[in-house]
Structures are given as C-alpha cells and as structure tokens.
C-alpha cells in the first residue's frame, strides 16, 4: 500500500511537470535549475516565494491570465491543477 501511494505521488509530480513544460516551458524555467527563456518570466522553482501555492489550483481552474502580452490565457482541470501544485511544491527553493 505504501509503495502504491509513493508511486502515485511520483506520477502526480511527473504529470504536473509535463503540463508545465507543455504550456509554460516556452518562456519559464520549469525545472530545478536553469534560466527562463523569456527574460521577464520567473523560474517556477521560486514561485512559492511570491505566490501562495495552496491557492494555485483554484487560480489555475479559473484561468490564468497576465498583463504581459506574451503570456497566453489558459485553464486547467481540477486534477491537472493539483498535479501542477504537487510538482511546484517539490521543486521550490
């Protein structure tokens, strides 16, 4: 049972990373190192310093938009939003 829970947690984190890479990786640094491709896009490993990660899934479900003209608007399902949060929690520095 414990092994199944650990495996599920790893899959959740992997899925969250894949989503961020697909939708955000063009501009943001998604991993635990490296610079963002877009100079104004903060690396996600520091997002927890300025944003409450507990509230992130709700924001992702409502739709994320920005004043920045290069950032598209997008929405995630509840499960996808929770997977993104799990990944972000795993990489915070």
Image (spheres, rainbow, N blue to C red):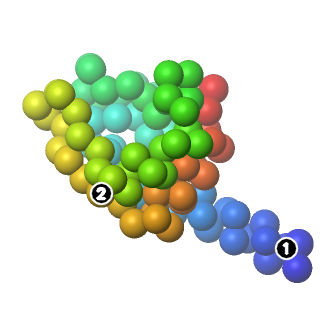
- Whole-percent x and y of residue 24? 32, 45
Q: Is residue 78 left or right of residue 48?
A: left
Front position in the image: 25 or 51: 51
Of circles 1 and 2, the one toward us is 2
- Whole-percent x and y of residue 12? 60, 64
- Whole-percent x and y of residue 2? 88, 72
Up-down: is 69 above or below 77? above
Gap between marks 1 and 2 measured at Cα: 32 Å
- Rate crowding at label 1 as few (under 14), some (14 to 19) or many (20 or more) other CA atoms within 10 Å: few
Looking at the image, which residue is at 60% across and 57% down?
13
- Rate crowding at label 2 as few (under 14), some (14 to 19) or many (20 or more) other CA atoms within 10 Å: some
Q: Which residue is mark 2?
A: 75
Looking at the image, which residue is at 43% across and 29% down?
43
The answer to whether one can see residue 82 in this image is: yes
Q: Quick one: label 1 or label 2, which is nearer the N terminus?
A: 1
Q: Is residue 88 left or right of residue 61?
A: right
Q: Mark 2 falls on what kind of element? A: loop
Up-down: is 70 above or below 87? above
Q: Mark 1 falls on what kind of element? A: helix
Front position in the image: 77 or 28: 77
- Whole-percent x and y of residue 59? 40, 46
Q: Which mark is residue 3?
A: 1
Front position in the image: 19 or 34: 19
Q: Quadrant of the C terminus?
A: top right
The residue most toward the right is 2
Looking at the image, which residue is at 19% across and 37% down?
71
Q: Is residue 21 left or right of residue 5?
A: left
Q: Quadrant of residue 18?
A: bottom left
Q: Which mark is residue 53?
A: none
């Amino acid at each position: 049972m414990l092994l199944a829970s650990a495996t599920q947690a790893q899959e959740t984190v992997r899925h969250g990373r894949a989503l961020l890479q697909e939708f955000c990786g063009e501009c943001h640094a998604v991993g635990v190192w490296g610079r963002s491709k877009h100079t104004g896009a903060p690396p996600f490993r520091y997002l927890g310093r300025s944003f409450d990660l507990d509230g992130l899934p709700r924001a992702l479900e409502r739709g994320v938009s920005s004043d920045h003209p290069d950032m598209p608007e997008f929405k995630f399902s509840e499960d996808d939003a929770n997977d993104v949060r799990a990944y972000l929690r795993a990489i915070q520095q």
